[in-house]
Structures are given as structure tokens and as C-alpha cells.
Image (cartoon, rainbow, N blue to C red):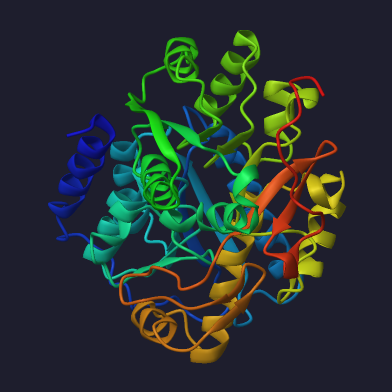
């Protein structure tokens, strides 16, 4: 069993035996007018610190806006954010403390499927709803917890579906003939590449290399060397952030330029990716995304306006991890308004019916919090990360083959 999967299972097991003896009653509420306390564990250090900090910006931006406009149900929102150092066991401990020691009214989720599963298990034991922005791997939904709501359009495993669909629109002569699949041992990352591999093989794309490397891997050079020794037309990488940066650097160093290059994560950060791999090395690289600043979704213009007002830049430099976090808060506002309550059980029951309009789209979920929609295909075009497929949301046409490095 892969180490990351073992880590997730171990953390879930730890969460499942947490004592509920001193638990705060999830349905209890403070007197009207007192702040609504929301507990959050985030990766502010460790492997996931870059996206974790982007999630923090989104949560804090939402809280500041909603507090300036009357709060939720007329009450101010108070966030208590603690660092989990990208460690699932620390995340479990954090949520345990937030619920039983700090007596928060609600909890929002962390970053990464690796931390979300065990954290949601703690929340379930104490009957808390678990609205979460960035934990959509298969291992999370396999827990079959009815309190989870992944606030994105699609489960992680479908991240690459739009890329596969785009490939099917190309003439057979322009499609890749061979592919390599280097993936991180992570419940978010490798399932994406696995699902894409299965679909591409059905299209006749031959797999010439596949590996799942340990989470502790820091030097991607040997792995990329093995992959490119097979001369694949396409590389589909199941990545998080640091390993995606490492793969690009190794490819550039080796002077190997595949016709198609797709990263599950890392390449979909409009700010971090070019800063880590070089702005001239991004063009033609594909990834998936759940959000675009140009989407005509509910409240999206407001979010973009508030983000730029606070942090500056331009819309296409907004990290989608921030939009996902804002959407979690937005969803809470919607369900609180509908139920007239922040009672956790009422939130869980309400969200399991109907469709909820957010900046992430019109969301609905199955019984275990897996969303029913579809992600976007994004590509780096002229130094800008933009949606390119499906055509109805595209801001540019997808192009291939990938230009040479530095071009």
C-alpha cells in the first residue's frame, strides 16, 4: 500500500477513535448577536503551504466582506485559523481542539484530500457539517461521510476529463501516440493520472512509462530521465505543487519537450507556477481548473472585485484556491439564509437537496459530498493561464504541440 494512502488511513483511524466525551453539542448556538466562530485548519507551512496560504486569503476575504455587510444572519463571523504544517495528524488534532476546546460553532475544511478525509471524520463524530474547498480525491468520498460537501464543480478524479475530451476533437494525425504517467503518491494526485491513462489507452494511446513516486521525493531528475528515455509524445503527471515545479525543471534541464504536457496540480496556479519554473517555460502546458475570473457564475464579479481591491494584480492572477475558499463561505451564507440557522444538522440536511449557486457554479452533491459537475481545461497561452475547453467557457483556443522551452 502506498505511503500516502497509509498516512490517510492512519489519520482517519486516529480521527475515528477521538473521544466525544467533552464534545460541544453541534446544534447549540450562542445568543443572537454574538460572533459566529468558525474553526479552520490550514497548511500555512510544509508541503502545501503555497496553496494553503491562497485558501487563507479566500477565507479571510470572504469574512471581511460579509462582516462589512451585516454578517451571517445578522452576526459577525470570527475565523480561528490554525496551522497543520501539511500534516494529517496535526489537522486531526487541530479540529479536535477547535470543536472541543474552542467550542467553534462551525468548521471549514483544510487544503488537500490527504488532510480532508481525517479532518471530516473528526467533524462527523461531533455532528458538524464539513464544507471544504480542496479535498476532492476518491479516498475522501470512499469514507462515506454525509457531512462532507466538496465546494467545487467536480470530484478530483474527473479533473482530466476535459483534457481527454479536447484530445478527441483533434484529428487522429495530431493526437499523441505514446504517453508517460509520473505521479505523486497522494490521494489527490495519482487517481487523476490513473483515470486519464485508462481513457487514453481506450483511445489507442500507448503507455510507455508509469510510476508513482514517494511524497518525500525532492529531486525529480531521475524520474523524468526514465520517463523521457521512452520518448513519449505526451506526459500526464499526477502532481501537487512542488513536484510539478520539479518536473518542469527536470524537463528543461534535459532539453526534452513533449508535444503535450498536463499537470493535475501546480500548473493551475497563475502566480506560483511561472514564478517557480520561469515565465518563459509555461506556454502550452495544460491543467484543470474549477474556476475562472470570467465565469458568469453567481457572485463571481463581486469576488473578483473584492480580491483585486484587497490584493491588487489582475483577474487572471487570482489563485483558484482563493476562489474555492470564498465559495465555501458563500455556500454557508446561502444555506444559513435558507434555513434561518447555523445549526449543523440543518445545514447538512438542506445541502443534500437542491442546487446551490456559487462562484464555483451551480453545485449539488451525492450522498457523500461528491459534486455532480465538470471541471474546465486551462492552458498557458502567451504567458496567461486561461480556460480553453469546453468552447462555451473558453477565452482562447487550445493549441498544440507545446512550444519549445523558453518560447
344 and 396: which is toward the camera = 396
Relative horizontal placement of residue 401, taking residue 142 as reference (left or right) = right
Q: Is residue 175 above or below residue 290?
A: above
Residue drawn where x is 24% and y is 36% of the image: 7
Residue drawn where x is 42% and y is 76% of the image: 365
Relative horizontal placement of residue 5, taking residue 46 as reference (left or right) = left
Q: Is residue 392 above or below residue 74?
A: above
| Residue 103 percent location from the top left of the image | 37, 61
User: Which quadrant, please, contains the N terminus?
Assistant: top left
| Residue 79 percent location from the top left of the image | 55, 56
Q: Is residue 219 above or below residue 243?
A: above
229 and 172: which is toward the camera = 172
| Residue 185 percent location from the top left of the image | 33, 32
- The image quadrant that residue 368 belongs to is bottom left
| Residue 163 percent location from the top left of the image | 58, 52
Relative horizontal placement of residue 1, taking residue 381 as reference (left or right) = left
Q: Is residue 231 above or below residue 13?
A: above
Residue 92 appears in the figure? yes
Amino acid at each position: 500500500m502506498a505511503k500516502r494512502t497509509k498516512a490517510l488511513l492512519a489519520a482517519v483511524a486516529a480521527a475515528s477513535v477521538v473521544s466525544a466525551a467533552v464534545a460541544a453539542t453541534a446544534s447549540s448556538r450562542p445568543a443572537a448577536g454574538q460572533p459566529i466562530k468558525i474553526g479552520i485548519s490550514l497548511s500555512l507551512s510544509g508541503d502545501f503551504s503555497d496553496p494553503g496560504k491562497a485558501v487563507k486569503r479566500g477565507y479571510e476575504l470572504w469574512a471581511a466582506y460579509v462582516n462589512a455587510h451585516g454578517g451571517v444572519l445578522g452576526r459577525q463571523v470570527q475565523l480561528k485559523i490554525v496551522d497543520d504544517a501539511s500534516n494529517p495528524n496535526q489537522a486531526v488534532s487541530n479540529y479536535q481542539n477547535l470543536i472541543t476546546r474552542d467550542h467553534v460553532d462551525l468548521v471549514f475544511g483544510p487544503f488537500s484530500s490527504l488532510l480532508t478525509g481525517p479532518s471530516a471524520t473528526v467533524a462527523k463524530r461531533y455532528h458538524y457539517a464539513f464544507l471544504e474547498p480542496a479535498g476532492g480525491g476518491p479516498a475522501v468520498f470512499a469514507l462515506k461521510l454525509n457531512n462532507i460537501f466538496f465546494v467545487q464543480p467536480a470530484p478530483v478524479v474527473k479533473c482530466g476529463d476535459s483534457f481527454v475530451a479536447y484530445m478527441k476533437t483533434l484529428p487522429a494525425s495530431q493526437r499523441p501516440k505514446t504517453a508517460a504517467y509520473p505521479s505523486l503518491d497522494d490521494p489527490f494526485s495519482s487517481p487523476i493520472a490513473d483515470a486519464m491513462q485508462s481513457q487514453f489507452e481506450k483511445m489507442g494511446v500507448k503507455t510507455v512509462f508509469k510510476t508513482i513516486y514517494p511524497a518525500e521525493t525532492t529531486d525529480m531528475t531521475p524520474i523524468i530521465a526514465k520517463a523521457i528515455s521512452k520518448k513519449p509524445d505526451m506526459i500526464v503527471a499526477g502532481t501537487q505543487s512542488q513536484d510539478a515545479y520539479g518536473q518542469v525543471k527536470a524537463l528543461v534541464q534535459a532539453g526534452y519537450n513533449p508535444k503535450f504536457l498536463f499537470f493535475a496540480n501546480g500548473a493551475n496556479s497563475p502566480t506560483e507556477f511561472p514564478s517557480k519554473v520561469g515565465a518563459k517555460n509555461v506556454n502550452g502546458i495544460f491543467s484543470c481548473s474549477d474556476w475562472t475570473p470570467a465565469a458568469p457564475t453567481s457572485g463571481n464579479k463581486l469576488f473578483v472585485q473584492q480580491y483585486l481591491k484587497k490584493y491588487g494584480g489582475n483577474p487572471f492572477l487570482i489563485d483558484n484556491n482563493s476562489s474555492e475558499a470564498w465559495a465555501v463561505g458563500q455556500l454557508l451564507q446561502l444555506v444559513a439564509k435558507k434555513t434561518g440557522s447555523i445549526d449543523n444538522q440543518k445545514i447538512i440536511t438542506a445541502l443534500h437537496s437542491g442546487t446551490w449557486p456559487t462562484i464555483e457554479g451551480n453545485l449539488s452533491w451525492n450522498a457523500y459530498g461528491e459534486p455532480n459537475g465538470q471541471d474546465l481545461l486551462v492552458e498557458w497561452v502567451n504567458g496567461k493561464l486561461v480556460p480553453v475547453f469546453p468552447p462555451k467557457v473558453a477565452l482562447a483556443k487550445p493549441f498544440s504541440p507545446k512550444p519549445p522551452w523558453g518560447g
